[in-house]
Image (spheres, rainbow, N blue to C red):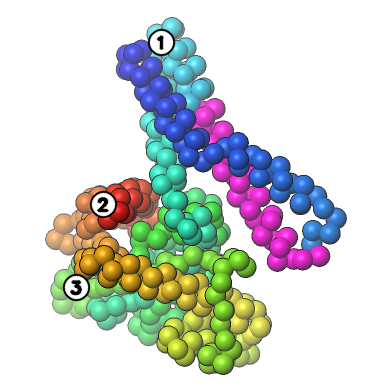
Amino acid sequence: MAATDFDAEIKQLQATLHTVEQVLDLPQMKAEIADLGEQVAAPDLWDDQDNAQRITSRLSMLQGEVERFEVLAGRVEDLGVLAELAQEEADAGVLAEAEAELVRVQKDVEALEVRTLLSGEYDVREAIVSIRAGAGGVDAADFAETLMRMYTRWAEQHKYPVEVFDVSYAEEAGIKSAEFAIHAPYAYGTLSVEAGTHRLVRISPFDNQGRRQTSFAAVEVVPVLEQTDEIEVDENDLRVDVFRSGGPGGQSVNTTDSAVRLTHIPTGIVVSCQNEKSQLQNKASAMVVLKAKLLARKKAEEAALKKELKGDVAASWGDQMRNYVLNPYQIVKDLRTGFETGNPSSVFDGDLDGFLEAGIRWRRDAEKATK
């Protein structure tokens, strides 16, 4: 790579980072960090545990965002020094190292740039992901379990904690449904583009005649609520059922009826939680999920009303949105963005960033087009 090429690439990276810095408003973020730091130092902070949790979580998130930007800016600066050194000494090994680092830095800067597109009201929130097997029998249940593994692998690769609330196992293989949270800033904004119907085409491992099978699974993503969110649930509108937790094959996990199922009677929304040891803890976790789903429902109804008033009758972008084809050829293709890969195995192992970035950019463009 010529010197002018390196210079141009690095200048482009610096320009992109400057734009990102303006969008993030780093001075404001640092001022808020200083203010939250003073609140954290207060001796009575933990007198109100919910407020203390909110403050410390916000502080941690802001510190992480600032550190991420500053580390990346430092890498761009170091890259310039490395490239200059390689060219001065005409060292092929150092030049190859600089070129490899350039590719890595470009990818990381692009990912940070995509983060700035997440400016929705709830985009900064953590996410609750629900997966439900659709048409396709045992293949659909197996596909639903594969999708759960895919998202948890993606979270693990990014070092995001995952909290499983409930898994309903199918009789033969796979799962009927699952509900889990991904605890990371912007998890909702990032994963919300995954909502919709996913379609798998493959030779069924459960068909003794080796026939090709098409199966479906639905993915729902909602934001985790905070105390300031105005979602009230009347206890009279709830039916609470308790039952014994179970695992694959009906194996008993607990010896007490600690699992909880909440049914919101007015809407028919059903939420289960069995990951905690006590009934009270499971009810509290289930209530978190229920409120998140009620908020998402409220926002969806508001959005639908706005579309109706505008006369927009187009189908929602969250409908069937991705095909995973394993036979007669191998491809995973997003039907909205056109983004695709010929390596389904890597996708099922959590390599989703390309799809997520394409989806976020697609959504931004779609929103612009409707304004």
| Separation (CA) of disc 1 from disc 2 | 46 Å
Tell me the residue at 43%/85% (across/down). Answer: 267
Q: Quadrant of the N terminus?
A: top left
Give amino acid for label 2.
Answer: Ala
Of tags 3 and 1, which is closer to the observer?
1
Q: Residues at badges 3 and 1 in contact (C-beta under 8 Å)?
A: no
The residue labelled by disc 2 is: 369
- Which quadrant of the view contains residue 142? bottom left
In the picture provided, is 247 more to the left or to the right than 47?
A: left
Helix, strand or loop at label 1? It is helix
Q: Earlier in the sequence, mark 3 or mark 1?
A: 1
Mark closer to the chain start, 2 or 3: 3
Secondary structure beneath dot 2 equals helix
Which one is closest to the eye, mark 2 or mark 3? 2
Seen in the picture, residue 314 relative to 66 is either above or below; the reply is: below
Residue 92 position, x and y percent, is 38, 15
- The magenta region covers 47-75
Q: Residue 149 is drawn in which quadrant?
A: bottom left
Q: Residue at x 48, y 87 (%)?
A: 264
* Camera-nearest residue between 214 and 128: 128
Task: Residue 137: give x, y in percent of width and height.
Answer: 27, 81
Report which quarter residue 205 is drawn in. Answer: bottom left
Within 10 Å of the Cα at label 2, are there few (<14), some (14-19), or many (20+) other Cα atoms? few
Answer above or below: position of 65 versus 311.
above
Name the residue carrying label 1.
87
Q: Which residue is mark 3?
A: 213
User: Which residue reaches farthest front?
Assistant: 309
Tell me the CA gap for discs 3 and 1: 56 Å
Task: Tell me whether the residue at label 2 lies in contact with that at label 3, contact meaning CB atoms closer than 8 angstroms.
Answer: no
- Specify which label sits upstream in the sequence, 1 or 2: 1
| Residue 195 seen | yes
Residue 353 magenta-highlighted: no
